[in-house]
Image (cartoon, grey):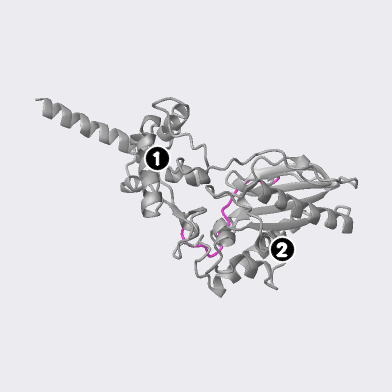
Amino acid sequence: MLKKIARDFLILFGLFVLWASTSRTAMTYLSDKRNLVAWWGSYQCLNGDLVSMSYLDAVKMFNQPNPRTGFKTPLYNGVRNTDLYLDGDSFTWHLKDSNFAGLSSFHYFERIHGCRYHLDTTKRNVLLIEISERYLQSYFSGLQMFDEVLDTSRKERRISYLNIAEQSHIRYASFVPSFDVHDFFNKYINQNLQFNLFNYEFMMPIFEYKAALNYYVFNRASGDVVISNDRKFLFFKETVSKTDVGSSYYPVTQEERARIVEMLNKVYDHYKAAGFSEVYVSIIPNSATIMQPDGYNDLIPSVQKDPRLRMKVIDIYTPFKSSTEVYYLSGDTHWNFKGKQLWLDVVNERLQNDQATNPTAN
């Protein structure tokens, strides 16, 4: 009798966990409720995204603090006539108007959320597209940006893909009223199941001990994290796998490079026609591109130097590549304070030079 009760309980519990792990609503609720410091709370990820993904908190060389503020205010005494629109990602979080030179206003929007803008025609309206290298080829395989960054006067959104491969669709549970077999194949099911079954603070010492053992004895990291050849950095697996399009070592063809340039030109023409005085792109290298360059596919310099490219480039690859400084965190996918400050310096130099050349709006 007890065996039957235990069996039925485990079956029901398993079905509930499966449903919760494929439900957007349930996962949002659970992650919000468990985002706290308690024995039943979720792992707080305090030491960098790659450290957290691999549970290597015990390896102190990867636990580097990264200040979010304290960037210098650029010296500038000229006309403040530029409205800057920064279309960015996690590399440019926490920036504010005082970090840039010559601005009359600053508009930051994270790419995944999009932006509706309304340009002030009396100002120099500048669009800066900051994108990390691992997303460059996939994002600019089409023109979905047109429906993510658009004028407020445009009433309807229409996905503007151009010869783009079929997008992977994230599915969530819909067991009722309309069941679909694909609900069992949510691409995030494994990480969601791990979150619901194992990601609890009281269990973390077990994961951390195992991760440290793998690192010191077998020179391995867990999951989607790879240790650099010199053992001084952690890399996100998709940035070093030769089969992943976001990798620094993925063999990019001439046709693929040409497509990126073509899409950037279409984006440039579109937003120039929409009224922007200038449109820039700034590609942030994968940490592996700079810290482990042997075998690099040369994606960033080949795109930036392509003679067909009309969009202006704010180049951070060259100063990173030519410097002996370390601009990346050892246990995180992102740059460190010095890397972000250098990027701000390069951006501000370009903004000031272009404003001096063309101080008025188009």
> Residue 281 at what x, y percent from top left?
69, 58
Type of amino acid under label 1? Glu
Residue beneath the point at 89% across and 53% down: 359
Using the rendered view, name the quadrant where residue 285 is placed. bottom right
What is the count of numbered marks? 2
What residue is disc 1 on?
Answer: 208
* Residue 22 vs residue 297, the one in the foreground: 297
**Residue 15 lies in quadrant:** top left
Which residue is at the far front?
Answer: 217
Type of amino acid under label 2: Met
Q: Nearer the viewer, residue 160 or 228?
A: 228
Residue at point 58%, 58% (across, down): 133
Q: Is 6 covered by the magenta stretch?
A: no
- Residue 183, given in percent of the width and then of the height, sits at 34, 45
Q: Residue furthest right?
A: 78
Give me the residue at 80% from left, 54% from top: 349
SS for tag 2?
Answer: loop
- According to the picture, the residue beneath numbered tag 2 turns out to be 311
Would you identify the image quadrant in which residue 53 lies?
A: top left
Q: Is residue 223 visible?
A: no
Please state, as top left, top right, bottom left or bottom right, where the N terminus lies in the image. top left
- Point out the stretch of residues depicted in magenta: 152-166
Q: Residue at x 61, y 41 (%)?
A: 66
Q: Nearer the viewer, mark 1 or mark 2?
A: 1
Disc 1 residue crowd, few under 14, some 14–19, many 20+, Cα 10 Å: some
Residue 283 seen in render:
yes
Q: Secondary structure at mark 1?
A: helix
Cα–Cα gap, marks 1 and 2: 46 Å
